[in-house]
Image (tube, grey):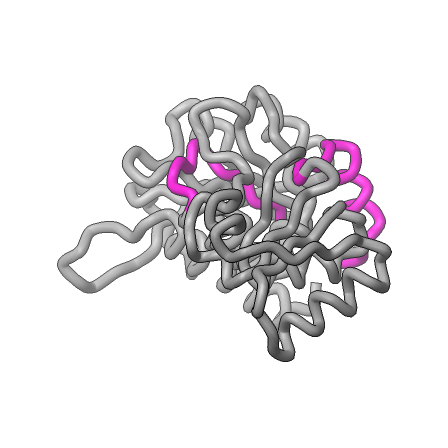
Amino acid sequence: MSDQIIYGINPVLEALRSDRQLLNKVLLAAGKEGGPIRLVRQLAREKGIPVQVSPKEALDRLGGSGHHQGVLGFTAASSYSTWENLLNRVRSEPGKSIVLVLDSIEDPQNLGSLIRTAEACGVKGVILPKDRAAGITPAVVKASAGAVVHLPIVRVTNLASTLEELKKEGFWIVGADSRAGKNLYELKFDMNVGLVIGSEGKGVRPLLLKKCDHTVSIPMRGKVSSLNAAIAGAVILFEILRQQLAQKV
């Protein structure tokens, strides 16, 4: 996300709290005060990141909207991690691992929400395709409430081959599919899980479903036949977390 902007108090605070040096400058709106702004100033000062004050209109123009809450952060490095960094995290941290694989998620709000949920559930990393999918934009960072800065997010050219690589690392690939015969609560997640969530309209592509060791559906009783990608992902991730906490794996 070089030369891009993080906007909003919480996303900027999370970027400042990150172990990585993600920002090279913070811009505050003139007259903006209060506890959160003082904390932004303090954290920026501790990391040696310059803070500049400008008229609110300047932040509106740079941020592309007025929803910045008087705070912009200018990124110093890419938001994307490498495959090697993700594997190092998986290999070095104890317990069973979850990696979230997102197939053609195009809506920035859904992508941000999925990343936020993934971070809350202790997911080790998120994998995105380079083509026909949303990337890490300022809108995604804000929708994730800053969770983007705490997770390795890897972009790959071929998701199918990436699933094969995850299998070589000891992962079982689980795809979310509304047509699956097995429902979410019938599968035991006592394993390393590569969870595949598909696009908002078409779900997981058939090529990727063929790579899955298991496919699961979410049981529903209402008249609505499906959930959006962000909600479906949250339901499944929290069920995996619940089981793994119960099993202490």
Residue 29 pos. (x, y %) = 57, 60
Q: In this view, does 180 lie to the left or right of 153?
A: left
118 in the magenta segment: no
Give the residues drawn in magenta, as a range: 79-108
Looking at the image, which residue is at 34% across and 37% down? 203
Looking at the image, which residue is at 78% across and 46% down? 89
Answer yes or no: is residue 115 visible.
no
Nearer-the-camera pick, 155 or 12: 12
Looking at the image, which residue is at 39% across and 36% down? 106
Residue 61 position (above or below residue 12): above
Q: Is residue 108 left or right of residue 148?
A: left
Residue 17 position (above or below residue 225): below
Residue 140 pos. (x, y %) = 50, 46
Q: Quadrant of the N terminus?
A: top right
| Image quadrant assignment for residue 85 | top right
Residue 156 pos. (x, y %) = 61, 26
Looking at the image, which residue is at 54% across and 25% down? 130
- How many marks do you count on the picture? 0
101 in the magenta segment: yes
Q: Is residue 33 left or right of residue 19?
A: left
Residue farthest to the bottom, as pictured: 35
Q: In this view, does 240 lie to the left or right of 176?
A: right
Nearer-the-camera pick, 36 or 235: 36
Residue 209 pos. (x, y %) = 43, 31
Residue 243 position (above or below residue 97): below
Q: In which quarter of the image is the C terminus?
A: bottom right
Nearer-the-camera pick, 40 or 94: 40
Answer yes or no: is residue 249 visible.
yes
